[in-house]
Image: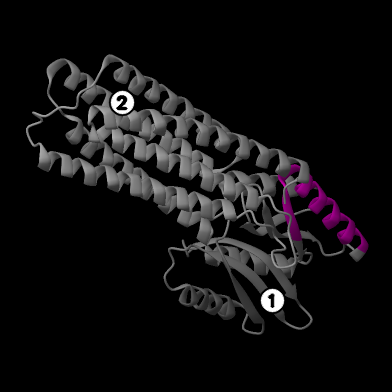
Amino acid sequence: MENATNASSRSKTIVKTSLLGIAGNIMLVAAKATVGFISGSLAIVLDAVNNLTDALSSTVTLAGAKIASKRPDKKHPFGHGRTEYISSFIVAVIVLFAGLLAIYESIRGIIGDPTGKNPPDYSLVMLILIGVGVLVKVGLGLIFRRVGKKVDSEALVDSGTDALMDAVLSTSTLVAALISYFASFSLENYLGLIIGGFIVKAGISMILSSYSLLIGERASKEKTHALRSLIASYDEVKGVYDILLHNYGPSRSIGSAHIEVDDKMDAKKIHDLTREISAEVYMKLGILLTLGIYSSNVATDFAKEMKNHIVAIIKNYPSVLQLHGFYINEEERFASVDLILSWDDETPEETIGKIKGEIASIYPEYNFYIVQDLDFAD
């Protein structure tokens, strides 16, 4: 899990950024609502409502960050980090709502004035205020995305994306306002319809991303490769397998892995090795790791021969991604091996049955057990 100091610093950064977003959007709401009502522009009023949803999004992000930073407790021993994924989902729903509202109001505007002969009554000061609003939204969007990526906050990144989309929407209203001002012709409803579609698309994308995080995603290649490389850097480790990582919020991971060691290594050395690896993994990668042990078991010529036969057999099965954990007890005539099968194999039990049958035909006197592992990490 996260170092307490880093978690506190991250939470403070999210809070400060969210407060900046709330303040900025409230000022935009006040300015645009005033312009919209005075000029009679539905598009500007709609833009103000959209900024209000942004303020609500920042409030949700702020609340999520505060809850996520709470200390673990008896009921939630892994902390409250996943709250941020819930807040990110709520932000995405707000974005989707804003997009649907934009489409609805634009269609109403088109029905009421299909030829655009009744443009709003803008003044030069109003146009300047709209232009400043565009710059403010771009600035907020870039700040939110930069800080969100820096502190690994999906909710902040989503809020930044929403702000940049809003800047595009505000730009379209500015262009429409300029056309209305100079040409006495209104295009704002048609532009609002198009931009509303883009916002809806962004909202749906953000919902799918947040939903995926909530139900649990496959660990990233970068994280699993970094973990595998760190563990494999120990001379005593002959292989790293079965990496399994659970995400309990940004930078909060709990996981397990198996390492293969020499079968002659005693319990004390294994204890010292696993403690040292777990400590380094936590310090460098922030992962609370539990390690299991595989015994390297190819000391005899017969064991090497059997393993080579098994390797040759599985090469004929493209869905088998990896073989590990080979173990043989020559005295009791027992052997086992773990196989990782691809998610694309729709009949894994049948594949394992065929492999086991081929092995049995070569070594009929042995009881052979195959463990099917799932492809949880690259």
Q: Is residue 179 visible?
A: yes
Q: Position of residue 138 (x, y in %)?
A: 43, 26
Nearer mark to the viewer, of 1 and 2: 2
Residue depicted at x 30% and y 35%: 45
Q: Which residue is mark 2?
A: 171
Q: Secondary structure at mark 1?
A: strand
Horizontal arrangement in the rendering, residue 344 relative to residue 296 (left or right): left
Horizontal arrangement in the rendering, residue 10 relative to residue 25 (left or right): right
Amino acid type indicated by mark 1: Ala
Residue depicted at x 57% and y 33%: 147
User: Residue extending furthest right?
Assistant: 268
Q: Is residue 168 visible?
A: no
Q: Which residues are magenta?
A: 268-290
User: Residue extending furthest front?
Assistant: 38
Vertically, is 135 above or below 284?
Answer: above
Say the numbered circle drawn on residue 335. 1
Residue depicted at x 22% and y 19%: 178
Q: Secondary structure at mark 2?
A: helix
Label 1 CA crowd tier, 10 Å (few <14, some 14–19, many 20+): some
Q: Position of residue 193 (x, y in %)?
A: 21, 39
